[in-house]
Amino acid sequence: MTRWFEDIVIDEEFPLGSHTFSEEEIIRFASLYDPQYFHIEPELAKHSHFGGIIASGWHTVSIGHRKMVDALFSEEERLKSEGKSPGVSGPSPGVNSMDFKVPVRPGDTVSYTLKVTAKRPSNSIPGWGLLFNQITAVNQRDELVYRADLVGFSKLRDYRMPLKLKLLLALTKAPVLGKLIKRGS
Amino acid sequence: MTNPVTENRRHFEDLAVGEVINLGTTSVSKEMITSFAREFDPFPFHLDEKAAKESLLGGLASSGWQTGGLSLRMLVDNFLSKIASCGGLGFTDLKWKAPVMVGDTIGGTATIAELRRSKSHPQWGIVTLDFDIRNQKDKPVMSMRLANLIECRTPETAA
């Protein structure tokens, strides 16, 4: 999905859309992953310095991730509709930093934006590149909710595998081939 | 004013750098992986066995955000719900080192790496924790450094 590594433009901004957090879903997420009293107990949460329940940071971030995945699929659809071949996104090796700023309260609407700040071919996985993604999330008052610096894999379009690697790959497949030949006979 | 929810819990002054929190273990089922992925991470490699086999993950694996969420849950159960926690500040250096596959059991430790008082809020301290999450084969699957706010028992002595 999305674009090929080569077609990613540095610092191009993608609005990812917004999400309004209900009290019900804040409690449901936190009950599973972050059951602290100020995320799941509206009455007890009044004693906290937040003065009421707030969303788990992990929840606002997970929604931000969903928004990014949706945007990658939309980009794939857009490219296909123009008759172009879409690229391939891979899993993520990690997150360099995540800063939670203002809390998200029930009824808040959070808007997410994605920007690729840098890219380079992967040293460890041939044929793939690394994208350095920045996601910013702001609430309806334009206050920063979080800023994240993430890393993602993206497939190279113009990659040609060196002969040495091709041989290595063939060797790793050999036992399977052997098994198939045996089964066939 | 004391907070009746947290007054009898451990405070900033009760913690020490080097303390190791045993997080216990959690088993990850196919149903858990696909239900999280449907809501938050609907890449084919988190939803569909065949697509997952052909992907870099090599099989149906949990979303990294779910692995992190499950690790956080273990920290809440074993630590954050027993201290005067005031919420998370964020994290750094999160690394998804190996995929968590259907049927895996993950667990590990969180170690207190740093304790410092908040400069802007004398009633709070910041506890920094290093996660070491492994699967049942003792293979590391995730690490990160998490920062969490905690109430101080004696804010007036803050420097």
Image (cartoon, rainbow, N blue to C red):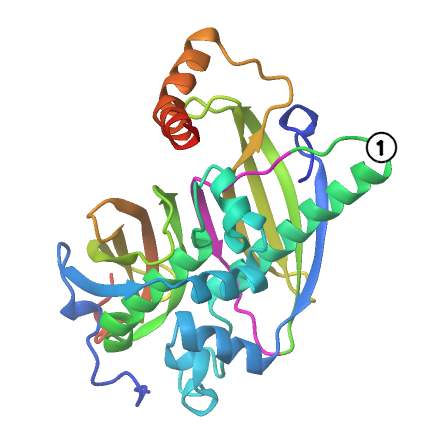
Is residue B112 covered in magenta?
no
Q: Nearer the viewer, residue B1 or B138?
A: B138
Residue A83 image offset from top left, x and y in percent: 85, 32
Instruction: Evaluate whether residue A49 shows in this view.
Output: no
Residue B59 placement, left or right of A14: left
Q: Chain of mark 1?
A: A
Vertical side of B4 occupied by B24: above or below: above
> Mark 1 is on which residue type?
Gly
> Is A98 one of the magenta-colored residues?
yes
Q: Which residue is mark 1?
A: A83
One can see residue B100 in this view: yes
Q: Residue at x 51, y 66 (%)?
A: B35
Position of residue A181 measured from the top left corner of the image (x, y, whole percent): 41, 25
Task: Identify which residue, B52 or B106, lies in the foreground.
Answer: B52
Task: Classify B97 as above or below B89.
Answer: above
Picture quarter with the C terminus of chain A: top left
Give the main secondary structure, helix, strand or loop, of the magenta stretch.
loop
Tell me: A146 left or right of A109: left
Q: Percent position (x, y) of residue B51? A: 55, 45
Q: Which residues are magenta?
A: A88-106
Q: Is residue B122 left or right of residue B136?
A: right
The residue furthest top is A163
Residue A18 locus on image (x, y percent): 70, 62
Secondary structure state at the residue bearing disc 1 = loop
Query: In percent of the image, x 57 and y 75: which residue is there?
Result: A105
